[in-house]
Image (cartoon, grey):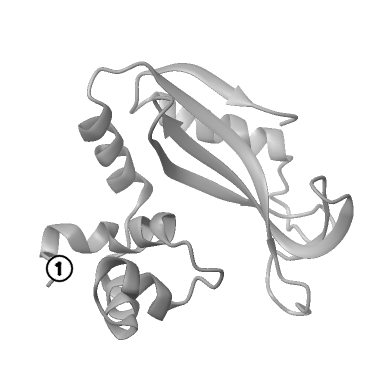
Amino acid sequence: MIRKTERKLTYPVALLLSSSFRKTFESLGREVGVSGDSISRIIKHDSATPGDLIKVVNAVFKRKRLYLIIDDTLILKVYSKLIAGTSDNFDSADRKTYRSLCSVVAMITDGNIAIPVDQAIWTAMEFATVDYKKKWVLAEQLIAKIYKKVPVYMVLADGL
């Protein structure tokens, strides 16, 4: 049985721990010992917020030297025609272009443990409304937001 205080973190922790190829409610439920239906209900009612994850970071790492990692990643949606935010994005790992969502992700680590704390979806200029932002601007906003709440020693990022 999952205690109420653990409910908000069940989904992100299960997602991190899951080694299964498909990240379904059933496979995530197996990781934390509950049914897929339970995971579905938890997500609908008690999803973890970036603020919740920052609290975990501060509790886990206490006064250690922390690094903030910022990187973008693609969530492939190759058959998407109507999913908001999808566009054709270049994947530098295999040098191909895919229909996908692009997420700029922020993770805190001490070098041993890494906890993802926030993310922002990037939308290509051709699909964005008036509020278009470049990836590096989203990264800069994530850094500023996290710096206010976590004592970060260094930011690690690639081309962003």
Residue 86, image x, y percentages: 73, 66
Q: On the rendered structure, is 7 left or right of 99?
A: left
SS at mark 1 in the image: loop
- Determine which quarter of the picture holds residue 7: bottom left
Residue 127 sits in which quadrant?
bottom right
* Residue 23: percent from left, percent from top: 50, 70
Question: What residue is shown at x 37% (from left), y 47% (from top)?
Answer: 50
Q: Residue at image x 39%, y 56%?
A: 17
Residue that extends furthest to the front in the rendered view of this protein: 19
Instruction: Give the amino acid at mark 1.
Output: Ile
Q: Nearer the viewer, residue 142 or 111?
A: 111
Q: Residue at x 81, y 52 (%)?
A: 125
Task: Give left or right: position of 152 versus 29.
Answer: right
Q: Which of 152 and 65 is in front in this view?
A: 65
Q: How many marks on residues?
A: 1
* Residue at image coords 54%, 31%: 69
Q: Nearer the viewer, residue 35 or 134?
A: 35
Relative to 133, is 151 on the left or the right? left
> Which residue is labeled 1 in the image?
2
User: Image quadrant for the N terminus?
Assistant: bottom left
Seen as rendered, the residue at the extreme right is 96
Pinpoint residue 139: horizontal percent, then vertical percent. Answer: 61, 34
4 sits left or right of 112 in the view: left
User: Label 1: how many residues lie within 10 Å, few (<14), some (14-19) or many (20+)?
Assistant: few
The C terminus, quarter of image:
top right
User: Within the image, what quadrant is residue 147 found in?
Assistant: top left
Q: x, y (%) of residue 39?
A: 31, 75
Image height of 24 relative to 92, above or below: below
Q: Residue furthest bottom?
A: 37
